Each structure stands twice: as C-alpha cells, then as structure tokens.
Amino acid sequence: MAKDIDWGSLGFSYMQTDYRYVSNYKDGKWDDGVLTEDSNVVINESAGVLQYAQTCFEGLKAYRTIDNKVVCFRPDMNAKRMADSAKRLEMAVFPEDRFVDAVVKVVKANLDYVPPYGSGATLYLRPYMFGSNAVIGVKPATEFQFRIFATPVGPYFKGGVKPITLRVPDFDRAAPRGTGHVKAGLNYAMSLHAIVDAHNQGYSENMYLDSATRTKVEETGGANIIFVTKDNTVVTPKSSTILPSITRRSLMYVAEKYLGLKAEEREVYIDEIKDFKECALCGTAAVLSPVGKIVDHDKTYCLPSGMEKSGEITQKLYDTLTGIQMGRLDAPEGWIKVIA
C-alpha cells in the first residue's frame, strides 16, 4: 500500500525508507548480503573511509511506468561504473550481477515508497561502498561495506525545467590523470566549496573547464553537459576526466536513433559557446535541465533558447528519453529493468 506522502511537493532530499541492503567484504570475499531496517552505519573510528576518503557511490532511480510497472533504467551500467570506480580506488569490486540483484531487492522491499506515475517524483537509489576497517598508515583498506538505500525524491533543481544559469569558476573539478572519470566521493567533497560559492553569487551550478589549459568545457559539479548547434547537431564534451554519465550516453543514442540527429562527442572549447543555440545538463538526478545563460567572468553567453523554457531540441530529447523510461515509447533492448 502506497505511503501517505505528498509526492508533488517532494524536494531532492533524504527521507528514510523501511529497508536497505548491506554486504561486507572480509578475508578476500563478499558475504551473502542482507536487507536490514537499521539505517545506521557503525564503523571503527579509524576506518579507511573516515581517514582517507576511500569511498565511491552510484545513483539511479526506480519509478512507475504508464502501465504501472515498477522499473529501473539501465542498472547494469551503474554496476559497471561502480566496478570501474572501485578498481581505481583500490577497493574490492562488488560483482555486477549482485549489484543489479541488490537494486531489485531494495526496490521490492520499499515498493510502497515508489511514487505514482505522473507525479514527477521517483524512488532514488544510492548504492555506495567504503573502506570499513581501521587504517592509520596511508594505504587501502582490506575490508569494505557495500550498501544501497532508497529515498523518494522530487526534481533535482527546485525550479523544475526552467532554464538555469551556470558560471565558469576559478576552481578545478578534476586533475589530468586524476579521478574525474570515476564516481569517487572525494571528487564531490572538492566541489562543495565551489557550489556554495556559486549559489551565494546567484548561480545554479559551476561549469568546469579542463584544469590543464582552462580552455575546454568539461562538466558541472553534478552533471554532464550537452550542447546543440545551430544546425541541430547534439554535441557533448569529450575528456578523460569527465564522469561517463549513463543519461548522457543514452541521450546521444536517442538523438541519433530516435530523432535522426547528428550526435558528436568531441572537445568543446569555451569560446565555442557563442555558436551554440541550446545547452542542458544531464544526469540521473537532473535528467535534462536546460541552461539559459553561462557567465565566464566578464563574458556572458545568453543561449538563443532563452531563460523561459527548454530549447526545441532539448525538449525533444527530454520527451523522448522520459518517454522511453516511463513506457510511453519502446525502449532499446536491455534499457528497462522491470522489478514489479
């Protein structure tokens, strides 16, 4: 029975649900894992995650489709990306098939928290892993805990689909040959001061440039970026320090295969922004959020799509991807994981 929640007024914030999944890695192997009602994590004061930020995470959603099925979107891709993150951070890899199975278990155990179709809300899932045993010298942990919790959420940006303003900050997001391409907690810790500073100055997000030359667009603190050229080519920045967004990769496929548009992943220079007609942020949390303005210190780029609504191509991409996710359009094979 659905919980008595005002789904339409939910923000993007934590609400405790009934069950979460926990599995521990010790003596070279993962245990069987369990669902638990205990939302507290108990670890040693010298745990690797507390001392050296040895942790990574994922984000995905469960939601109801138009025919009232409860589904997830491409959870196998989250499983693979988390495996890549774990390898880079010298952590034990949680098996990809078990990751997907744990997602299913958590959603089924919290079905009453899956918002109704059309509410605009979803059940957000947060898989994460951390070094759990005591470490005092600078070295990887030898024991790890993998967990997934679920929380119902509303839109990531409070304004909904109204275009947002980005700024180019004086901060860097990721170093060349660093960890920008994996979903490490430390990447987000580094971005916190920059996002608070951006919000204090009236901007929604930071648009980071490559730290080597500061001439090329990379991504924002919480999402990948796409642009649309005046001839309707969908362009996304290419860089070895960008997190490979599952939503972004799906949108590029949709642009080509569903909308018949040209889609390019290439280096995008900051001085090219004046030539684009649309811009948007994409990611699991944001899905696709239009950008109306980008401020680079003394330069302001106003996208022709304006500050009132999404651009034409951005809207088509959003409508098509959410149509696939919500069951209104046929999905490519393997994209939709039916849970209930």
Image (cartoon, grey):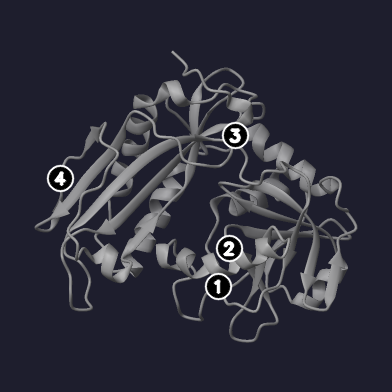
Going from N to C along the chain, the mark reached first, 1 or 3, is 1
Given the image, on which type of amino acid does mark 2 rest? Gly
| Mark 1–mark 3 distance (CA, rounded to whole Å) | 30 Å
Q: Are marks 1 and 3 in contact (CB under 8 Å)?
A: no
Tell which residue pokes out farthest to the bottom in this image: 213
| Crowding at mark 1 (Cα within 10 Å: few <14, some 14-19, many 20+) | many
Mark 4 or mark 2: which is in front? 2
Identified at 52% across, 63% down, the residue is 243
Q: Position of residue 6 (x, y in %)?
A: 58, 23
| Mark 3–mark 2 distance (CA, rounded to whole Å) | 24 Å
Going from N to C along the chain, the mark reached first, 4 or 2, is 4
Q: Which residue is mark 2?
A: 221
Going from N to C along the chain, the mark reached first, 4 or 1, is 4
Asked which secondary structure carries label 3, the reply is helix
| Mark 4–mark 1 distance (CA, rounded to whole Å) | 35 Å
| Mark 2–mark 1 distance (CA, rounded to whole Å) | 7 Å
Asked which secondary structure carries label 4, the reply is loop
Q: Are marks 2 and 1 in contact (CB under 8 Å)?
A: yes
Q: Which residue is mark 3?
A: 325
296 with respect to 132 (left or right):
right
Mark 4 or mark 3: which is in front? 4
Identified at 45% across, 77% down, the residue is 178
| Crowding at mark 2 (Cα within 10 Å: few <14, some 14-19, many 20+) | some
Mark 3 or mark 2: which is in front? 2
Q: Are marks 4 and 1 in contact (CB under 8 Å)?
A: no
| Mark 4–mark 2 distance (CA, rounded to whole Å) | 34 Å
Q: Which residue is mark 1?
A: 173
Q: Is residue 327 visible?
A: no
